[in-house]
């Protein structure tokens, strides 16, 4: 695993694309705000994954605080990407969702100054960026309860879901097509 990939600076590894005879590279990105209760869950999961996947030279685990165009830029050069983030869909807190970019196509960006991930990926491809195919971008969403209050702790149900979410992401990394094993 690329040791510098998770420092939050936005730096990408020197050679993220697969070399001949080498496995395709996968990027795992945990998103969130470390100061807003359940919104930090993606960052917490990324920290655990960094330790769990340290032996994998074909996987980079990083944390970020932005979506949209900046998230797309982080994916340049990778064959696969797994994004882990808090979501609010109305399901019980701690529910783990598996999403694709197709399921996000109608979602709006959290910022009026940015675009949603599917739109960002389309823009990047139109500009010639080498990005994972839509079928190789997976999103693991953890249903949040509190994404507005300042706290360095997740709510109990969301905190309890972290180990399960870590296992789900490990399964995605280990499954060639990126599909969770049942």
Image (cartoon, grey):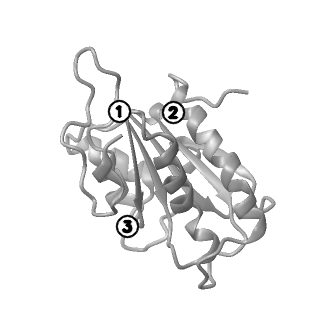
Return the x and y of residue 162 as percentages of the image width and height.
66, 55
Q: Report whether 128 appears left or right of 149.
A: left
Q: Is residue 89 above or below residue 83?
A: below
Q: Is residue 106 above or below residue 79?
A: below
Q: Report whether 118 appears left or right of 139.
A: left
Return the x and y of residue 76 as percentages of the image width and height.
27, 43
Quarter of the image holding residue 24? Answer: top left
In this rendering, the label closer to the viewer, 3 or 2 = 2
User: Tag 3: Cα neighbours inside 10 Å, few (<14), some, or many (≥20)?
Assistant: some
CA distance for labels 2 and 1: 12 Å
23 and 98: which is toward the camera: 23
Q: Is residue 102 above or below residue 33?
A: above
CA distance for labels 1 and 3: 32 Å
Q: Residue at x 51, y 33 (%)?
A: 173
As drawn, the label of residue 165 is none
Are the two marked residues, 3 and 2, in contact with CB atoms closer than 8 angstroms?
Answer: no
Q: Residue at x 54, y 42 (%)?
A: 102
Residue furthest out toward the top: 21
134 and 26: which is toward the camera: 26
Return the x and y of residue 53 as percentages of the image width and height.
47, 39
Residue furthest out toward the bottom: 150
As drawn, the label of residue 173 is 2
**Element carrying mark 1:** loop
Sequence-earlier tag: 1 or 3: 1
User: Tag 1: Cα neighbours inside 10 Å, few (<14), some, or many (≥20)?
Assistant: some
Residue furthest out toward the right: 92
The C terminus: image quadrant = top right
Q: Which residue is denoted by mark 3 in the rendering? A: 114
Sequence-earlier tag: 2 or 1: 1
As drawn, the label of residue 57 is 1
């Amino acid at each position: 695993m690329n040791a510098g990939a998770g420092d939050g600076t936005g730096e990408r590894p020197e050679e993220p694309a697969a070399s001949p005879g080498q496995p395709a590279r996968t990027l795992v990105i945990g998103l969130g705000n470390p100061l807003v209760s359940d919104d930090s869950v993606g960052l917490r999961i990324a920290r655990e994954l960094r330790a769990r996947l340290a032996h994998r030279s074909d996987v980079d685990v990083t944390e970020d605080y932005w979506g949209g165009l900046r998230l797309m830029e982080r994916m340049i050069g990778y064959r696969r990407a797994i994004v882990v983030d808090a979501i609010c869909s109305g399901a019980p807190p701690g529910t783990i969702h598996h999403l694709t970019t197709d399921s996000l196509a109608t979602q709006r960006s959290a910022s009026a100054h940015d675009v949603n991930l599917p739109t960002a990926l389309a823009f990047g491809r139109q500009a010639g960026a080498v990005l994972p195919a839509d079928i190789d971008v997976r999103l693991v969403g953890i249903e949040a309860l509190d994404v507005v209050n300042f706290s360095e702790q997740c709510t109990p149900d969301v905190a309890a879901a972290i180990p399960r979410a870590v296992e789900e992401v490990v399964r995605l990394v280990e499954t060639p097509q990126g599909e969770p094993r049942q």
